Image (tube, rainbow, N blue to C red):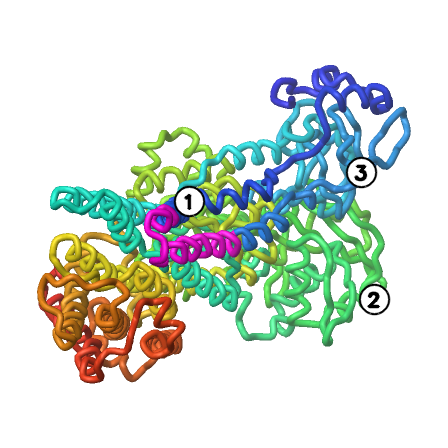
């Protein structure tokens, strides 16, 4: 609206309003036309749809398909345990869906709106009178009144303003408060206000030009809701893995269905065995194991102040290659402090351990800083004052209070008059009566304005004339401070009894004060850790370029950065932006929300895995678009938290480093337990193949396979999923974008080396038992024959004990696992205990023997079974040795 009607008269005419405000009838008509003044960042989801979504992912669908096939096999061949398999698979899917749904539903209940950014009630002018209305009822053309502490409910233009100071950081990311002025004639940025901003000081009347989705906040809402989120890397990898497993299972099952048909087996027999092979290929225990590993990792991250909204986000952060971070409140404290002083033509660090109050040059500057402000002392806390006021003035007062008692200094002066800060004049003054009866004027303002009003400068030896050379030196120092990203104010004074207006000239220059929103002390170490881990940090801020560059250099993120401001960025296309990002060190300043989104899109186009940190409403679109969105928990807006994947409860950038370490560890661990889980597929599949091709009894039943996948393999796999990070994990570069969670090397390790070794050991004890019992090659042997049950129990025991050696070997990928034998993992130890107990119960407890088609086998057969873990562990150690020697194809 303001862009279309650039002057006061045209704006009032276009809005059809006058100084007396809208009538009640006109306001109701406009409410129907424009709709309520309401914005929704979060679209509520139906709980039923959320629950249904848990069942339609590829892995649950695969398990449901395996369950359906098991029901079919039970119908074709009752009494073989297929109904138990079907029920167990259904139970796995339902349990996982329930856990995931409960977690997501909790998040849904927390992240439903951002109503904190629209006040509940506001004061507007209706029918010529001020009335208190619900903010939802504000319409374009309303005249509303705002004061200190209010949040602005709509976009508008100031028609009157008194010392108005606005905080728009949640919209722009710019840390400095903005002084606003009333509309004179031409509509400029200084007389516009936006929905969601906060009034820090003063009061004003606002002519509303936009409400609801037609506001600045509404535009960000539309941008955020239009962003499409990609699958996380883990989701993509699990999807690819399930596709491979599905096609492998269907391929092998179909192949041997055809083989059985050609060798003359009945159709239904072939179908049952094809179903058995398919079920054997499906790693039923993988879904709960992945869920538990990610959940445990999420819990550990929660203990370190990183709240994970979706457990798959844990692993994504581990794969991050670029972190796009805001400056204000993320890298910095979001609180100004005095950084440097320039007095007596000397640059002094404000953090020096010296008593500035005893310095003859600095003491008058401290006095002016203490007096020339509107800061209120609220209360005493542990011997120190708490202050309220403009952030810049508060920073100065806190600095003074650290070096001398503020109240004792103020007590020496009695206030007489005040001239508030004026955004056009760029200075303010406070006039006092001193104890000696004389008048004291303290003045503060922009350096260029203050230098014009001064004719002397204070030095340790007394006052000297402010000649052109000294004036130029002071102006140059102010420019240097500003060029370093510091906010510069100058202070002056005059001691006499003259008229106030006359005293605004002929001042004594006291010094420059340079302020900064300081970096968080823990961030430099976090930045260094990110660099050693090969993670690039890109600073994106709404602040001015000098400030962003200064902070980025202070933290070690960059050394000599190229600063790209929003205006430059708006003239770039995607290819040009990518070229800039590839060109070296760069920081972004004065960036609008949609531009932050452009930067994220460019990085993703480059193949980067992008994490974005933020706390403001303006960060929401980029947080949502990123591979991983990280919101600040303390200062973060509800909008940012809703759009994010992880919330930092302590607002500490360093927490991200711990989270990255955890994410990398969980990725490594998932690879390890997938290798472990896949290995047992070979000794589970080969018996069916051998049974179809060779005249031998079936070595293992489907119910025994399910016992391995869902009982004996689960705890050891969980143990592998909870291994601590390896020592060098944060010294490795991020994994490549195209690196597979389960690639050819993993299949070679599981299906080509360890799996065949386990199968060979299991077949050896199987035929040992059969031979000891008098079975001869090709002789028929019923499934319920005691000899068959003994041999089958021995086959099952050999697989389980081989997996004990496998889990110990899988604790490392390349390095020897021998040193870890003396550092047991409690989950792995518990898993091994369960495995041993399970096979003993299955073999020797009658009810379980019947369920699992097992019988006690000869005691001497236990000796090769007990040696199986050592054999498997030795084979894996040999593979790792060859990998370390450079045999890359054997690496996992």
Q: Earlier in the sequence, mark 3 or mark 2?
A: 3
Q: Secondary structure at mark 2?
A: loop
Residue at mark 3: 122
- Quarter of the rendering containing residue 819: bottom left
Q: Position of residue 669 (x, y in %)?
A: 33, 64
Q: Nearer the observer, disc 2 or disc 1?
A: 1
Q: Nearest the camera: 497 or 518?
A: 518
Residue at mark 1: 57
Identified at 83% across, 35% down, the residue is: 133
**Crowding at mark 3 (Cα within 10 Å: few <14, some 14-19, many 20+):** many
* Residue 79 lies within the magenta run: yes
Q: Earlier in the sequence, mark 2 or mark 1?
A: 1
Inter-mark Cα distance, 3 to 2: 48 Å
Residue at mark 2: 436
Q: Main secondary structure of the magenta part?
A: helix
Inter-mark Cα distance, 3 to 1: 47 Å
**Crowding at mark 2 (Cα within 10 Å: few <14, some 14-19, many 20+):** few
């Amino acid at each position: 609206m303001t862009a279309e009607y650039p002057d006061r008269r045209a704006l009032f005419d276009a809005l059809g309003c006058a100084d007396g405000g809208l009538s009640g009838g006109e306001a109701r008509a406009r409410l129907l036309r424009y709709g309520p003044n309401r914005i929704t960042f979060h679209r509520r989801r139906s709980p039923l749809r959320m629950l249904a979504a848990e069942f339609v992912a590829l892995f649950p669908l695969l398990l449901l398909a395996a369950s359906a096939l098991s029901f079919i096999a039970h119908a074709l061949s009752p009494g073989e345990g297929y109904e138990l398999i079907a029920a167990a698979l259904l139970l796995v899917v339902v349990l996982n869906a329930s856990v995931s749904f409960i977690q997501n539903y909790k998040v849904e209940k927390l992240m439903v709106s951002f109503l904190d950014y629209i006040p509940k009630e506001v004061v507007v002018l209706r029918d010529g009178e001020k009335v208190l209305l619900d903010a939802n009822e504000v319409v374009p053309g309303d005249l509303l009144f705002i004061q200190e502490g209010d949040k602005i409910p709509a976009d508008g233009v100031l028609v009157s303003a008194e010392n108005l100071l606005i905080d728009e950081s949640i919209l722009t990311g710019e840390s400095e408060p903005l002084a606003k002025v009333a509309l004179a004639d031409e509509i400029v940025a200084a007389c516009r206000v936006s929905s969601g901003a906060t009034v820090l000081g003063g009061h004003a009347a606002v002519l509303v030009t936009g409400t609801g989705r037609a506001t600045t906040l509404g535009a960000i809402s539309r941008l955020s809701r239009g962003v499409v989120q990609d699958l996380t890397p883990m989701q993509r990898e699990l999807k690819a893995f399930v596709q491979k497993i599905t096609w492998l299972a269907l391929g092998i099952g179909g192949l041997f269905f055809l083989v059985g048909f050609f060798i003359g087996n009945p159709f239904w027999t072939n179908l049952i065995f094809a179903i058995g092979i398919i079920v054997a290929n499906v790693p039923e225990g993988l879904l709960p194991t992945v869920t538990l590993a990610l959940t445990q990792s999420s819990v550990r991250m929660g203990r370190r102040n990183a709240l994970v909204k979706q457990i798959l986000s844990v692993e994504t952060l581990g794969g991050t290659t670029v972190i796009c971070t805001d400056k204000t409140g993320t890298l910095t404290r979001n609180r100004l402090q005095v950084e440097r002083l320039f007095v007596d033509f000397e640059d002094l660090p404000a953090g020096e351990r010296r008593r500035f109050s005893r310095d003859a040059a600095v003491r008058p500057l401290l006095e002016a800083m203490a007096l020339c402000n509107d800061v209120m002392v609220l209360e005493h806390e542990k011997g120190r004052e708490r202050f309220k006021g403009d952030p810049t003035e508060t920073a100065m007062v806190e600095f003074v209070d650290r070096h001398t008692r503020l109240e004792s200094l103020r007590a020496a002066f009695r206030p007489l008059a005040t001239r508030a800060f004026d955004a056009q004049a760029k200075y303010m003054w406070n006039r006092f009566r001193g104890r000696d009866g004389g008048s004291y004027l303290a003045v503060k303002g922009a350096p260029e304005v203050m230098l014009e009003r001064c004719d002397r400068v204070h030095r340790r030896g007394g006052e000297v004339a402010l000649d052109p050379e000294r004036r130029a030196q002071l102006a140059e120092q102010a420019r240097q401070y500003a060029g370093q990203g510091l906010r510069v104010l100058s202070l002056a004074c005059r001691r006499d009894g003259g008229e106030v207006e006359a005293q605004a000239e002929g001042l004594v220059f006291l010094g420059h004060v340079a302020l900064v929103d300081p970096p968080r002390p823990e961030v430099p170490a976090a930045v260094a850790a990110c660099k050693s881990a090969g993670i690039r940090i890109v600073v994106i801020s709404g602040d001015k370029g000098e400030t962003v560059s200064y902070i980025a250099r202070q933290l070690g993120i960059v050394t000599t950065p190229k600063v790209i401001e929003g205006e430059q960025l708006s003239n770039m296309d995607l290819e040009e932006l990518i070229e800039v990002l590839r060109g070296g060190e760069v920081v972004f300043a004065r960036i609008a929300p949609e531009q932050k989104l452009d930067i994220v899109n460019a990085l993703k186009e480059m193949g980067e895995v992008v994490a974005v940190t933020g706390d403001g409403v303006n960060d929401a679109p980029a947080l949502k678009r990123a591979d991983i969105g990280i919101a600040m928990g303390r200062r973060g807006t509800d909008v940012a938290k809703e759009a994010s994947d992880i919330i930092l409860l302590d607002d500490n950038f360093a927490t991200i480093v711990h989270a990255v370490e955890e994410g990398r560890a969980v990725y490594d661990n998932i690879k390890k337990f997938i290798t472990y889980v896949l290995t047992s597929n070979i000794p589970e599949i080969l018996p069916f193949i051998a049974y179809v091709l060779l005249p031998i009894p079936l070595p293992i039943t489907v119910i025994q396979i399910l016992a391995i996948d869902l009982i004996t393999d689960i705890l050891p796999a969980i143990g592998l999923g909870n291994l601590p990070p390896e020592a060098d994990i944060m010294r490795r570069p991020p994994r490549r974008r195209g690196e597979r969670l389960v690639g050819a090397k993993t299949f070679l390790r599981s299906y080509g080396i360890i799996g065949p070794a386990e199968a060979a050991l299991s077949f050896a004890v199987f035929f040992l038992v059969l031979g000891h019992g008098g079975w001869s090659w090709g002789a028929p042997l019923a499934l319920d024959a005691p000899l068959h049950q003994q041999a089958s129990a021995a086959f099952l025991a050999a697989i389980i004990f081989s997996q004990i050696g496998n889990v110990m070997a899988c604790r490392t990928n390349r390095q020897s696992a021998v040193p870890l034998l003396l550092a047991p993992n409690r989950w792995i130890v518990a898993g091994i205990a369960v495995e041993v107990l399970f096979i003993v119960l299955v073999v020797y407890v009658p009810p379980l023997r019947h369920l699992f088609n097992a019988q006690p086998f000869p005691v001497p057969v236990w000796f090769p079974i007990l040696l199986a873990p050592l054999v498997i562990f030795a084979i894996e150690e040999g593979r790792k040795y060859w990998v370390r020697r450079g045999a890359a194809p054997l690496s996992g």
